Image (spheres, rainbow, N blue to C red):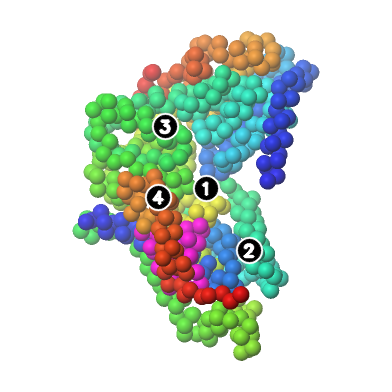
Amino acid sequence: MTKFLRSLGLATLVASAVHAADDAAGPIKVGEFASLTGKEAAFGQSSHKGTLLAIEEINAAGGVLGRKLELITEDNQSKQGESATIAKKLISRDKVVALLGEVASGRTLEAAPIAQHARVPLITPSSTNKSITEKGNYIFRTCFIDPFQGGVMAKFARQHLKLQRVAVLSSVALPYSVDLAKYFREAFAAQGGAIVADLKFTEGDKDFKAQLTSIKAAGVDGIFVPGYYTEAALIARQARELGLTCPLFGGDGWEAPQLIEIGGPAMEGTYFSTHYSSEDPSPAVRGFVKRFRVRFANETPDAMAALGYDSAMILADALRRAGTTEPAKLRDAIAATRNYDGITGRTTIDSHRNASKTAVVIAIQDGRFHFVESVAP
Amino acid sequence: MVEFFQQLLNGLSLGAIYALIALGYTMVYGVLRFINFAHSDVFMVGAFLGYYLGRLVPAGTLWGGLAVLAGAMAGCALLGMTIERLAYRPLRGAPTLNVLITAIGVSLLLEYSGQVFFGAAPRNFPAIFPVRTFHVGGLVLGSNQLIVILVSVVLMVVLQLIVHRTKIGTAMRAVSLNPRAAVLMGVNNDVVISFTFGLGSALAAAGGILYALNYPSVDPLMGLMPGLKAFVAAILGGIGNIPGAALGGLLLGTTETFVNGSQWSTYKDAIGFAVLIIILLFRPAGLLGRFTIEKV
């Protein structure tokens, strides 16, 4: 009840906050909402570290518009319902000029209408669900979208893995999982493959043996698991326990060290698509990996970290071009981003406010992520 | 056919865990006539105790696994008795609703202290028992599944013996039948209730470890879903009835598994709960529960 009252209060504040000009003397405030704890904490932590590194580097180089950037981060604990409240708080109380946030599409979808309503630009670094940027003209993203990602994995499964009969095991309700499964099914069927089993699991499930037993009975040569790393790892383990040796593959929701920690040897011979590989030999990636390792105790940055970094850099770039923190002009500047060279490739914001970018396919071998191929749109 | 037996096995190993948790709900209801909502969080603490104790023993040995199991059960029995002493005993004689709300409070306390002490990120549960896979005519038997079923059966038999063959068990049944009369017959109700909480919590700890063994990721909110399912299982079997809780757990586990493995997997929880409603329509007191008319 208190939460409800608080959000009601904040909602009314939002309207008045829109017109309150940002204090020109202090630092430029940038809001970030992330899953720093909870089930998808690995995503939030990576993305946050990337964003933080970008902000620190921008400030070390003198900031933008003669002012420093200040990152205000709030944790949504990987829970549903928190992101909306946090977005309201960041906009109305902290008066941020823009929001950066979330890896998980479902939680970005919660914050997007609030940012749109308050006319504060929101850039999601790595939410791939197609409908996010359809929430309004203030919502942007710096990564590819699921129709493309589903197509990449379908093509990879058909041409590289030479799979014929594939099962799809997806979540009942997660927007990311539902959509990615849908686009994969369409693309895989269009390329002559057959989906012979299509099963669902519920958020928070830990027992997948029932679904996997019927997948095994259906006789498949591959299993597509669009979901996040905790589920993917448990599914892989239980599949191997049931004697399913065929390859498993998924999307960018798999990329976290916990995938291998929880999945262990069961993850050998599995594949997923993502946004970048830290093994990429380009000087931009090498420099980023090196700086990230120095800043964060020798940790290798994953795709979420790289996208977090890029999203903050693109925001700073737009602020410079806009020459002001005024929301409408900042929005236009972000929309006008063309051929921005970042860590995750060249970013151009299209008319749907999405970025069309290259995807990378990663294989897991000997408990490590290895680059297999990159697929251009 | 092989698929059917494989699913049955999957269902039984899931159902056995639900049954272990359901026993705790049903025993507490039997003596105190209230639902101990903190029970599902004792289950979580059991899994975490297993996680920490599992580091102290050599991994993948039978005696090490059993030691962890016994340690976690003892720890949770102590926790259950402490909860009863601090939270529920002061409310003895108060309306059931007050106790119920206190139970929800204790549940939230355990969940969020868990987030503070254990962290909110899921952790990988160690393989404390030796892991093997057996193939029997196309059927794949995981050693963990077998351990779950074996340990559950042993614990349920021991429980049955305690309740029916010991003095304290007789006292438990007496308190459950009529607490006032039990006191008059010289039964110390506080000791009996404390013992019941300890016993139920130990079973929850065993359930927690067996659950974490099969699905090796533990987090402070892991008790929510299994706790809810076990609660349903207890109602399904007839709350307050010990064999009923075991039957309800097995029934719910197998139903869920068969639905999950079919094309209707989207509606798993809906079908599970629909079964509950249908059974309660025909047997309002649950499968094995006795229907009692309350005098007004």
Magenta stretch, main secondary structure, is: helix
Where A80 sits versus A96, above or below?
Answer: below
Give the CA separation, mark 4 to mark 2.
29 Å
Of residues A176 and A153, the one nearer the viewer is: A176
- Which residue occupies 49% across, 17% down? A352
Q: Amino acid at mark 4?
A: Lys
Quarter holding residue B210: bottom left
- Which residue occupies 48% across, 47% down? A204
- For residue B100, the mark is 2
The residue beneath circle 3 is A179
Mark 1 or mark 2: whose residue is earlier in sequence: 2
- Which residue occupies 53% across, 54% down? B224
**How many neighbours does mark 2 have within 10 angstroms: few (below 14), some (14-19), or many (20 or more)?**
some
- For residue B122, the mark is 1
Residue that sits furthest to the right in the current view? A25
Mark 4 or mark 2: whose residue is earlier in sequence: 2
Give the CA separation, mark 3 to mark 4.
20 Å
Q: Amino acid at mark 1?
A: Pro
The residue beneath circle 4 is B268
Residue that sits furthest to the bottom in the current view? B185
Q: Are marks 4 and 2 in contact (CB under 8 Å)?
A: no
